[in-house]
Image (spheres, rainbow, N blue to C red):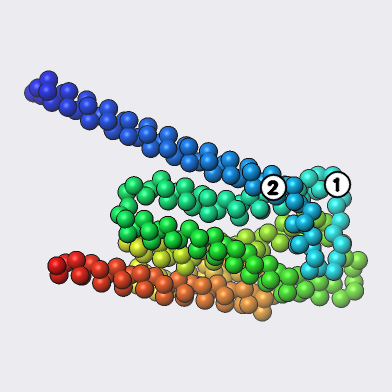
Amino acid sequence: MSTPEDQYTNSTESTEKEMNVVGHLSELRNRLIVTAVIFIILFIIGFLNVKDIYWFFVNDIDLELTAISPTEIIWVYFSMAGLVAIVGTIPVLAYQIWAFISPALTSREKKISLSYIPALFLLFIIGLIFGYLIFIHLIFPFLLSLNEDMFNIMFTVDRYFTFLMKITLPFAFLFELPLIAMFLTSLGILTPHFMRKNRKYAYFVLIVIGVLITPPDFILQIVVAVPLMVIYEISIYLSKIVYKKKQEKHEAFMNE
């Protein structure tokens, strides 16, 4: 039978665990609130500058976009402001996640993981730019060339920007793959051997993504898929570097 002292100890430990869980949940809530506030602020900033953002995106096309209903005008404001808010909130969200999990990391892991945050933001921007260039210089001209003077071309605002986002955003997220591979390798979740072993499956997924975000033209799909495969190979190379350094430090520690 348990003694009163044991029961008191168990009760105290249970209470401390509950307090820890409540404390973590409270911290997580506060960090999510901070992220949401930043998102709202950036959304308002984007909303107030929609005109400049809009002209930036339509400056490279020779067509005049048409709004066929008042809701499309509102949609443009919300989509442009939302894009600004999403892009600007990415580093904030990444930092809040890092700050939440950092107490469980070593000082070295804290420094390394913190350095991923600016890289995360930079790669997202590069992915957006790359996707936009692919859209403007390859995909959109190809679609217009199919017309061959058969139709009077008229694009509505919502259809144009929906299609544009459908092309560019996948590139932005896929450009994060090298960083994700490095981070998971540093945590011991992923290895370069696993990535090489499953290369053919990864290529298949990337080709499917290329097919989904491009028109039904084989050349265009190859043009889109090849950079994605290159990104995967870069991810393997960076994962190999992280894995090798991790092994060297482990061996040095074991030999001490």
Residue under the point 77% across and 73% down:
141
Figure quadrant of residue 128: bottom right
Residue under the point 31% across and 71% down:
245
Determine the secondary structure under disc 1: loop
Task: Residue 5: give x, y in percent of width and height.
Answer: 12, 23
Determine the secondary structure under disc 2: helix
- Looking at the image, residue 38 sits to the left or right of residue 158; the answer is left
Picture mark count: 2
Task: Say whether residue 117 is visible.
Answer: yes
Quadrant (top left, top right, bottom left, bottom right) of the C terminus: bottom left
Residue 45: numbered disc:
2
In the picture as drawn, the residue positioned furthest to the top comes out as: 4
Distance between the Cα atoms at labels 2 and 1? Answer: 25 Å
Q: Is residue 6 above or below residue 156?
A: above
Quadrant (top left, top right, bottom left, bottom right) of the N terminus: top left
Figure quadrant of residue 20: top left
- Looking at the image, residue 66 sits to the left or right of residue 208; the answer is right
User: Which amino acid type corresponds to the residue marked 1 in the rendered image?
Assistant: Ser
Task: Residue 121: give x, y in percent of width and height.
Answer: 54, 60
Q: Nearer the viewer, mark 2 or mark 1?
A: 2
Q: Is residue 197 above or below residue 42?
A: below
Task: Residue 190: give x, y in percent of width and height.
Answer: 36, 64
Residue under the point 38% across and 48% down:
101
- Looking at the image, residue 71 sits to the left or right of residue 128; the answer is right
Residue at image mark 1: 69
